[in-house]
């Protein structure tokens, strides 16, 4: 009798959850992600995973520029520092961002900012700079 009750209760909870389209989100710190899990995430196989980008995390950054006018030559890594906690998911081929694991937005709805290019002379040689400002939208 107990087993039947547990089964009915489990079914009722699952049915309610499906009806409300609720999802259990598994949070994985970005610093602990594996190549395999990351690939599955971007292939859409793991929409229930959220990558946690913790404040203070330093991420190596590579820059790739290509086209018929410019081609980037990278001779090493630079890094970016996460200034605010946020989460990243991939659902139906789109990256989604959140600060609270409840309200998810695509890149252009979550962020605002600008990208720029400038030239200067450093050590008597022309130097190109790529500038990016990225802020969370209100």
Image (tube, rainbow, N blue to C red):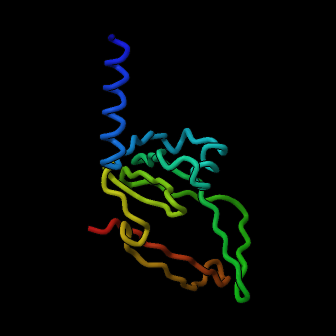
Residue at 57% x, 54% y: name it. 44
Indicate whether 127 appears above or below 38: below
Nearer the observer, 72 or 15: 15
Q: Which residue in the rendered view is the most extreme toward the left?
A: 138
Q: So how many labels did they put on this image?
A: 0
Indicate whether 93 appears above or below 130: above
- Which quadrant is the C terminus positioned in? bottom left
- Which quadrant is the N terminus positioned in? top left
Residue at 64% x, 62% y: name it. 62
Task: Quadrant for residue 9, please give it.
Answer: top left
Q: Which residue in the rendered view is the most extreme toward the bottom?
A: 69
Residue at 50% x, 56% y: name it. 90
Q: Which residue in the rendered view is the most extreme toward the top?
A: 1
Residue 88 rendering spot, x and y as whole percentages: 45, 53
Indicate whether 120 appears above or below 65: below
Residue 112 rendering spot, x and y as whole percentages: 37, 73
Q: Horizontally, is 18 left or right of 36 in the view? A: left
Nearer the observer, 117 or 93: 93
Q: Horizontally, is 123 left or right of 80 in the view? A: right
Residue at 62% x, 41% y: name it. 34
Q: Horizontally, is 37 left or right of 132 in the view? A: right
Nearer the observer, 124 or 98: 98
Residue 16 rendering spot, x and y as whole percentages: 30, 40
Residue 123 rendering spot, x and y as whole percentages: 64, 77
Indicate whether 60 appears above or below 105: above
């Amino acid at each position: 009798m107990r087993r039947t009750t547990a089964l009915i209760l489990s079914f009722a909870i699952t049915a309610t959850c499906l009806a409300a389209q609720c999802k259990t989100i598994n949070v994985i710190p970005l610093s602990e992600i594996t190549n395999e899990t990351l690939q599955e995430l971007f292939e859409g196989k793991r929409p229930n995973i959220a990558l946690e980008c913790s404040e203070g995390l330093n991420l190596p950054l590579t820059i790739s520029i290509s086209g018929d006018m410019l081609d980037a030559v990278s001779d090493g890594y630079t890094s970016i520092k996460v200034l605010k906690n946020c989460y990243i998911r991939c659902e139906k081929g789109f990256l989604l961002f959140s600060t609270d694991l409840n309200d998810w937005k695509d890149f252009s709805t979550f962020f605002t900012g600008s990208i720029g290019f400038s030239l200067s002379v450093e050590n008597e040689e022309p130097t190109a700079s790529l500038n990016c400002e990225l802020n969370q939208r209100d």
